[in-house]
Amino acid sequence: MQIVVPVLTPFTKDGKVDKETLKEHVRNLIKYVDVVFVNGTTGLGPALSKEEKKETLSAVYDVTDKVIFQVGSLNLNDAVELVNFSKDFHLVGVASYSPYYFQRLPEKWILNYFNELSRKAEHDFYLYNYPSATGYDISAKLVNKIEGIKGLKDTNQDLAHSLEYKIANPHLIVYNGSDSLVYYSLLSLDGTVASVANHSPHLLSAMRRFIKEGKKEKALQVQLIINSMLDVMRRYGQLSSTYSMVEVMMGYKVGYPRPPIYPLSEEEIHQLKSEVEPLKRKAEELISG
């Protein structure tokens, strides 16, 4: 019943990775979560250079070794270099999404890509399945052909899809990556990889505690509050809103996103805060009661 945070990547105003802010953010998160997923979608991984991905790993590792390092790239040589770079660190694992953009890639090419990485990895290898972003859905049958695979993150609104992996291979560690399915992921899978853990890790921790205590109704109420927060965030752009939500929910700034993900305007931040504050109060009353 693990909580994994796909940590955001803070940038300075001039677009540089803000390593000190990232470290401080991780120090606050690790009090509530089990693992930090570096360079995922929330971390704007596809928009980071190879060197920036190394910077984020090094910064996070200064705080914790409970890290899954996402190395995926359309340039396989870059991905392999990142796998090799990871060998200097004691990590939970390395992960990769599938090749994207290019349509109708043969399944054997997808398998070759993952095996190229898993063979070179000295850490446990995790697959990152995000079909709505990559255009390719990794089947449970294909997953079982990947050499040395330890687990996967399935970003999918269909929980049954995530369960298919677990049914096909009960030893596989399976996380669902949908923020709106955290409650159900904690109940039926090995855990969740949830972007909302960047700003509401205490709520996810409370949800897990309620489940363990048999207070499933209260746990579900936490999920419903999170869903309401997500509705607000999506109106302003969820990736950008995640940065602003950290200040609203946790009381400190985490820098800026970087184009093509643009920061919210001051007016948008004010509106976001006014809509989220009642939900924040409701959540605090629920988890303290």
Image (cartoon, helix red, strand yellow):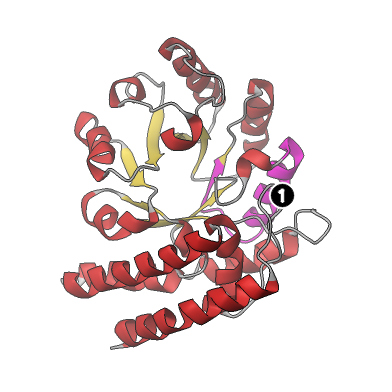
Residue 88 appears in the rendering: no
Q: What's the amino acid at mark 1?
A: Pro
Along the viewing direction, whichever of 81 and 92 lies nearer the viewer = 81
Name the quadrant of the N terminus. Answer: bottom left
Tell whether 230 sits left or right of 285. right
Please tell me in which quadrant of the rendered image residue 204 appears. Answer: bottom left
- Is 279 above or below relative to 158? below
Residue denoted by label 1: 259
Residue 54 shown in magenta? yes
Name the quadrant of the C terminus. Answer: bottom left
Q: Residue at x 51, y 65 (%)?
A: 30
- Near mark 1 (Cα within 10 A), the count class, few <14, some 14-19 or many ≥20, is few
Q: Position of residue 230 (x, y in %)?
A: 43, 63
Along the viewing direction, whichever of 59 and 50 lies nearer the viewer = 50
Q: Residue at x 38, y 26 (%)?
A: 138
In the image, the segment drawn in magenta is 49-69
Tell whether 287 sits left or right of 168. right
Q: Secondary structure at mark 1?
A: loop
Q: Residue at x 69, y 74 (%)?
A: 266
Tell whether 44 sits left or right of 222. right
- Is 88 above or below relative to 188? above
Along the viewing direction, whichever of 30 and 158 lies nearer the viewer = 158
Q: Residue at x 59, y 56 (%)?
A: 8
